[in-house]
Image (tube, rainbow, N blue to C red):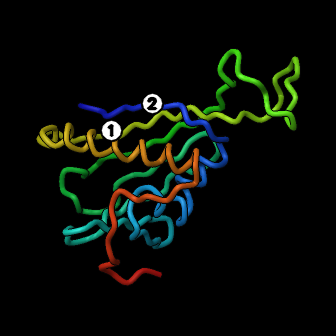
Amino acid sequence: MPEIALQLDIAAPREVVLAALTTHDGLTAWWTTAVDRDGEVLLFDFPDVPEPFRLRVERADRDRVVWTNAGSFPPHWAGTWISWELADQPAPPGRPVAPDRPETSDHSAPSERTRLLFRHGGWQPGSEDGVPAVAGTWAELLVRLKDYAQSGKVQPYFVTAHRHDGP
């Protein structure tokens, strides 16, 4: 079974990246302007799509965020899951440490960098043809996520109006 896996380093603390993945303001800043929630299910609307993508939040903590597909649309996402693994990254060698965070021998100061490992798996037989296009879209989305986490610049990839009534 195919799996999309992408890794990137983000020059932002883990808490900032986590908020971009778990809050309404974070998700609408880099992914789509139309995000709602129905309990533990996130509803994502996209232009020219007849119904929202429904992703159930299975886990959301400082180490990992996991969503599973909870809807019938899009059909090729049936049975898939999305995982975001977050880890602190030390500053690159030779980079000065922020003055308010002196470097200590036990490296206990919070990291200003995050390594993000993104995975989208669980593709069912017969859905493999769509995986390369989905992977390309995820790559573009992750660039926007990184830009947002590092700069705070809001630039969602998809801009749309809500098509359903959310809570």
Q: Nearer the viewer, residue 94 or 53?
A: 94
* Residue count near mark 1 (Cα–Cα under 10 Å), binned few <14, some 14–19, many ≥20: some
Q: Secondary structure at mark 1?
A: strand
Q: Which residue is mark 1?
A: 121
Q: Secondary structure at mark 2?
A: strand
Tell me the residue at 22%/58% (across/down): 74
Q: Residue 3: x, y in percent? A: 30, 33
Q: Which residue is mark 2?
A: 7
* Quadrant position of the N terminus in the picture: top left
State left or right for residue 34 relative to residue 99.
left
The answer to which of marks 1 and 2 sits earlier in the sequence is 2
Q: CA distance from mark 1 to mark 2?
A: 15 Å
Q: Nearer the viewer, residue 37 or 137?
A: 137
Q: Amino acid at mark 2?
A: Gln
Tell me the residue at 55%/57% (across/down): 22
Q: Amino acid at mark 1?
A: Gly
